[in-house]
Amino acid sequence: MFETLQPAPADKILALIGLYRADTRPGKVDLGVGVYKDRDGRTPVMRAVREAEKRLLASQDTKTYLGLAGDTGFNAAMIKLAFGDKADLSRIRAAQAPGGSGALRLVAELLQRTRAGATVWLSDPTWPNHLPVMRAAGLQVRDYPYFDATSGAVRFDDMLAALKTANSGDVVLLHGCCHNPTGANLDAAQWAKVADVLLERGLLPFVDIAYQGFGEGLDADAAGLRLLAEKVPEMVVASSCSKNFAVYRDRVGAAMIIAKDGAQADVAMSQMLAAARALYSMPPDHGAAAVRMVLEDADLKKDWETELEEMRLRMLRLRVAFAEALRRQSNSDRFDFVASHRGMFSRLGLTEAQVERLRTEHAVYMVGDSRINVAGLPEDGMDDLAKAIVSVLD
Ligand code: PMP
């Protein structure tokens, strides 16, 4: 039976990890995979998460099933984290999901159940997994212009113009903060304008928030999502704890719904849970239980926020130092945008051939579209790196 299959195309980012590992050159630089790293290139378990895990181990006396929505305390805490204290809880529901990816799929399944074959508009470019996840649920995909590779800015007018051509009932997927792969984000005024267009045209916002706390801070990073929640009657959200709690492999995320009223929210939630039943039944407990314990305990929460803020500020310092090194080495302001981008990524605007040369000639690894993971920038080797980048420009 399997003889009819062709091998699935390799995931480019995962393939890059293999090449990097096999590279024996000293001083190699890994700006590839989207995982936060400290100065030593490690991705440690966060202090508060480790403490919560200890408490969990000591206190957990059963591992019996929790139910399709997972840990309800986690779900309530995730709603608060995303929407803030002032959210209208009567019409918001959340279901724990296996990572942000699982949350995206759950929301997509809900959309398919309510409007089969609906069109989801994705930013061009976007996180590559958005496309297969939406398609797997049966949804159609279109894209809206988003990024100007030369200036490193958002093509905001083009984005709005494209959204104005969308049909009522279409879905618009927006990165809540820290756009992946570009690092270019909407400001408050732009979020407000997007909200107006969504309302005018009857479009449903679908916010993917996978880096809350990595950009401007926990609340600031959710400002766009909160503004939408105040203005629009309905909205869906996929959030991930992979990065901001560093629980990548534990698979922790939440799928959230805002409906017109509580009764509709309950019906939508029941459909989303029915979809979960058919996909994987129940989400894995451990990581979500640890995250819930952190968010419910004032001391653990404070410690988590402190460590997250250290990570955020480190990435900001690296951005500034890298932009300065590029300015020195290139004698131009071409890469200044790196300092104003936010989150874990920036897209440098290099060609695939230039990216390839960086790898083969300088042992510098980045994704083929020239996306860099800012957390991988070498604190003590910025000028060498900038020099290597400038050397492949012509
Ligand atoms: N959305 C975006 C934009 C992402 O970058 C990621 C992680 N790379 C995710 C969702 C989901 O991540 P995970 O499934 O690991 O939580």
Image (cartoon, rainbow, N blue to C red):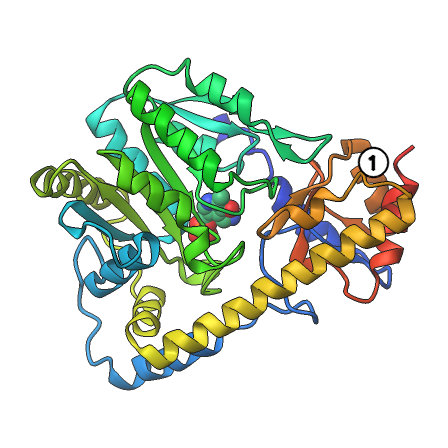
Which amino acid lies under the numbered mark 1 shown in the image of this protein? Gln
Residue 42 x/y as whole percent: 63, 69
Q: Is mark 1 within 8 Å of ligand 1?
A: no
Q: Is residue 378 left or right of residue 183?
A: right
Residue 341 x/y as whole percent: 63, 46
The crowd level at tag 1 (other Cα within 10 Å; few <14, some 14-19, many 20+) is many
Residue 358 x/y as whole percent: 84, 44
Residue located beneath label 1 in the image = 354
The residue under the point 92% across, 32% down is 394
Compared to residue 89, the image places residue 49 above or below, namely: below
The residue under the point 66% across, 44% down is 346
SS at mark 1 in the image: helix
Nearer to me, 34 or 226: 226
Compared to residue 310, the image places residue 103 above or below, namely: above
The quarter of the picture where residue 300 lies is bottom left
Q: Is residue 340 left or right of residue 382?
A: left
Residue 92 x/y as whole percent: 20, 47
The residue under the point 22% across, 58% down is 70
Q: Is residue 243 left or right of residue 354?
A: left
Nearer to me, 60 or 294: 294
